[in-house]
Image (cartoon, grey):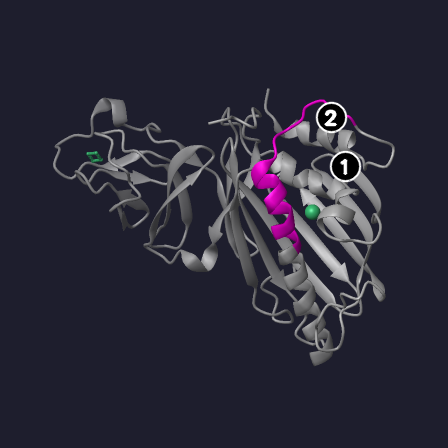
Amino acid sequence: MNIRYDQPIPLGWFALEYSSKLAAGDVMPLQYFGRDLVLFRTESGQARLLDAYCPHLGAHLGHGGVVKGDNIACPFHGWQFDGDGRCRAVPYATNIPPKATDKQIVGSYAVVERNAMIWAWYHPNNEAPGFEVETIAEIGSPDWTDIEVYDWKINTIIQEAGENGADVAHFMFVHSSPEMPQGEVTMDGIRRSTLLLNKVPRINEAGETDDSGQDWEFIEVNSVNVGPGQTIQRITRAFEVVMMGTITPIDEQSIHLRFTFTVPRSQTDMNQTLAEATRDNIAGGVEQDIVIWNNKRYVENPILCDGDGPIARYRKWFSQFYAT
Ligand code: FES
Ligand SMILES: [Fe+2]
């Protein structure tokens, strides 16, 4: 197999799962960050993430492991581990072995729940979180609709998928935009904000897109990247849509992309229809990108032209997430 990407997995907060999918006592095997992992929710309701393999004799805690109080019990011989990766009980031994006493013996991850999702902090050198997951007030607010979710697994890396916003020229070729979007990009530490004015085919009152090539309108898209794993997009037309994009590295060659949408409940039926059509357009748009991403490779020293967007600036910004 050709290795198309040789970048390491970036550091940051990454979405693991929707909170509603993990009830108290649930155990879920996961594969992210090139690792086998186990996600579980304690009886008191805390989500915890550990490396999957038991240090006793190697069973996968995510396949048959059982939550007991704040701990997870291994399916093989019942050893129990807490969310910090310490052994708390060996049910059939008189003493916990000294090697397993009062120290971490299973890899663990900082976990937070925000915006209806469970997030873990990944750092290749196990350094503590350097920033936070941004709270999106609209998600979970009683004034906004229940979330609608989309997800894709793609053979690409976060840096490449994120370059999409900086690459203004591709909108004309991949997304049939009549012209390049006018963008304004601000980068500030781990945050990168883009205000795009994008000319798109008008959506009619039935929520259908006008394909005649005659009728256009402008859509204002305000995107904020918070680290490599979270994007917040606010779309304002006659209506409003809020989207949270999350990207989680599966391994060095593939990602899990999710879109979470909400719209104001108070929007008129007409604007609700338009907002839903816009949401479907966004999801359809990324599927056009996916065909490119699934098959391209990374060009480290691209030959760029004067019409290209701020790709070099974007790459410099992204490089802060590669630990040295
Ligand atoms: S392998 Fe986990 S308790 Fe033995
Ligand atoms: Fe795109």
Mark 1 vs mark 2: in front: 2
Residue placed furthest toward the bottom: 269
Q: Is residue 122 left or right of residue 178?
A: left
The question of residue 291 being in magenta is answered with: yes
Q: Quadrant of residue 90?
A: top left
Residue depicted at x 73% and y 26%: 302
What segment carries the magenta color?
285-303
The question of residue 194 being in magenta is answered with: no
Residue depicted at x 67% and y 28%: 320
Q: Which residue is mark 1?
A: 188
- The three-letter amino acid code for the residue at tag 1 is Asp
Q: Quadrant of the C terminus?
A: top right
Identify whether 85 is placed above or below 144.
Answer: above
Residue depicted at x 61% and y 66%: 141
Whether residue 227 is visible here, answered yes or no, is no
- The three-letter amino acid code for the residue at tag 2 is Pro
Of 188 and 313, which appears nearest the observer? 313
Looking at the rendered structure, which numbered label has been put on residue 302?
2
Give the x, y percent position of residue 134: 64, 48
Residue placed furthest toward the top: 324
Separation of marks 1 and 2 at Cα, in angstroms: 25 Å
Q: Is residue 102 left or right of residue 237?
A: left
Identify whether 271 is placed above or below 191.
Answer: below
Give the x, y percent position of residue 178: 83, 54
What element does badge 2 sit on? loop
What element does badge 1 sit on? strand
Give the x, y percent position of residue 188: 77, 36
